[in-house]
Image (cartoon, helix red, strand yellow):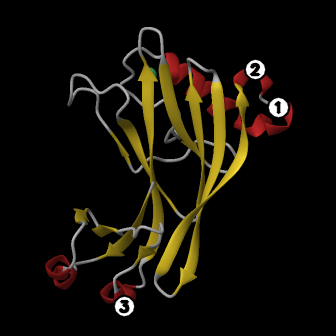
Amino acid sequence: MELTVKLFGEHEEILRTITNVALVKCGAIVTLTKDIHGVFEMPEILKKFSPRLFLRCEERGGGRTASGKAQIICGLSGKPLNPFHVFSNSRREFFAEKAHAIFSVPESVAMISFYRGSKNLNIRNFSLRMVHTRRYVIHESKIWSGKIEDFPVELGKYSNAVAAAVAKASCYHCREPHYIAVKE
Ligand SMILES: [Zn+2]
């Protein structure tokens, strides 16, 4: 999981002075670098642009003949999120276990990991925390982990996302997202 900063408008000055910048339709996205303690630092120069911070995470995974794993992203409510980008499966012939959708989420997100062989399921919460001026960490906490057959009914709000993770881990050479919000 990465931490990104979204800037709106033209920012040539920034593009010249810092790395990890990607231009997007309405501005630029800067991926912050992390030190060995897991602390992300926002460059001083970005401060004046009233930057907005986002957690950047991916749906990935897929099945193989006898194994498979999946990582599904959803809101803390269990609902699917709008992806920032979906990889078109026509662009690359084979991308099982690669990223199939990228999400850019403010504040917090839930991640569901499922391993088909061991039937292990992990549900984790990732949230953004400021630890100092311009310094942030992504705090990780466990929501639940165990065997899929022991998944508790009290966590029913995650059942659709869990079902998507289980399906994806069995989806042979999966090349598409399984759990994203559909635009109406
Ligand atoms: Zn699939």
Ligand 1 lies in which image quarter? top left
Q: Nearer the viewer, mark 3 or mark 2?
A: 2
Location of residue 109 in the rendering, given as x and y in whole percent from the top left corner = 59, 53
Residue type, label 2: Glu
Image position, residue 107 (x, y; %): 58, 65
Query: Whole-percent x and y of residue 166?
Result: 59, 23
* Camera-side residue of 108 and 180: 108
Q: Secondary structure at mark 1?
A: loop
The mark found on residue 48 in the picture is 3
User: What's the amino acid at mark 1?
Assistant: Pro
Q: Are marks 1 and 2 in contact (CB under 8 Å)?
A: no
Mark 1–mark 2 Cα distance, whole angstroms, equals 9 Å
| Rendering coords of residue 125 (x, y %) | 64, 52
- Label 3 residue SS: helix
Question: Could you tell which of marks 3 and 2 lies nearer the N-terminus?
Answer: 3
Which residue shows up at 48% across the image and 80% down it? Answer: 135
Q: Which of pointers 1 and 3 indicates the residue nearer the eye?
A: 1
Disc with the residue nearer the chain's start (1 vs 3): 3
- Identified by mark 3, the residue type is Lys
Classify the position of the N terminus by image quarter.
bottom left
* Residue at 84% over, 31% down: 153
Q: Residues within 10 Å of mark 2 (few under 14, many from 20)?
A: few
Residue named by callout 2: 149
Residue drawn at the location 71% of the way across and 25% of the way down: 147
Residue at the limit of the structure toward the top, as seen here: 65
- 102 vs 115: above or below: below
The residue where tag 1 is placed is 152
Horizontally, is 141 left or right of 18 in the view? right
